[in-house]
Image (cartoon, rainbow, N blue to C red):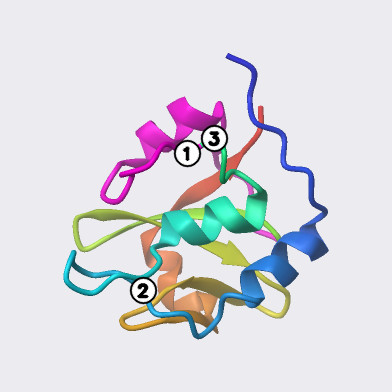
Amino acid sequence: MMPFVCPYSPAEIVARARSWVGRPISRAEWRPGETCLHLAAYAYGWEGSIPPGWQGKTLADLAAATGWRLTDKAPCAGALGAFFIHGHDHLGIFTDGGFLIHAGVLTIVEAIADRYLPYFKGVMECP
């Protein structure tokens, strides 16, 4: 499988992710919205690479679908961060100034990244 190559620059990835800040997130079937995977798919241009019904899949599933891998590189603006929070895989997009865009409690938010670094597993990237 050829890895998916993102067509956007880091600045474009951040701008695309920021355009989703404030969108409602999905926590259950009765409350439709976006998830961290939807955010990543949009920001990186994966919309056609991620099959429908992917809510709740693992980082390993994402890696298999995109050909990307988890690395131990330090995050920078535009990097896709992988986290393991409260027993679940989670994704977020690092921005400038130490912030992270991710699916928060109710909406897509841009928050201080330091709060999430204890859960940080690495950066997902194209090999």
Magenta stretch? 50-76
Nearer the observer, 40 or 90: 40
Give the tally of numbered discs. Answer: 3
Q: In this view, does 65 lie to the left or right of 106?
A: right
Instruction: Report which residue position mark 2 lands on.
Output: 25
Q: How far apart are marks 2 and 3 (CA)?
A: 21 Å
In the depicted structure, whether residue 44 falls above or below residue 93: above
Residue at position x 36%, y 61% from top? 119
Whole-number angstrom distance, CA of label 1 to CA of label 2 = 18 Å
Whether residue 54 is in magenta: the answer is: yes
- What amino acid type is highlighted by mark number 3? Ser
Classify mark 2: helix, strand or loop: loop
Residue 92: x and y in percent read 50, 63
20 is within the stretch colored magenta: no
Q: Position of residue 38 (x, y in %)?
A: 47, 57
Crowd rating for badge 3 (residues with CA inside 10 Å; few <14, some 14–19, many 20+)? few
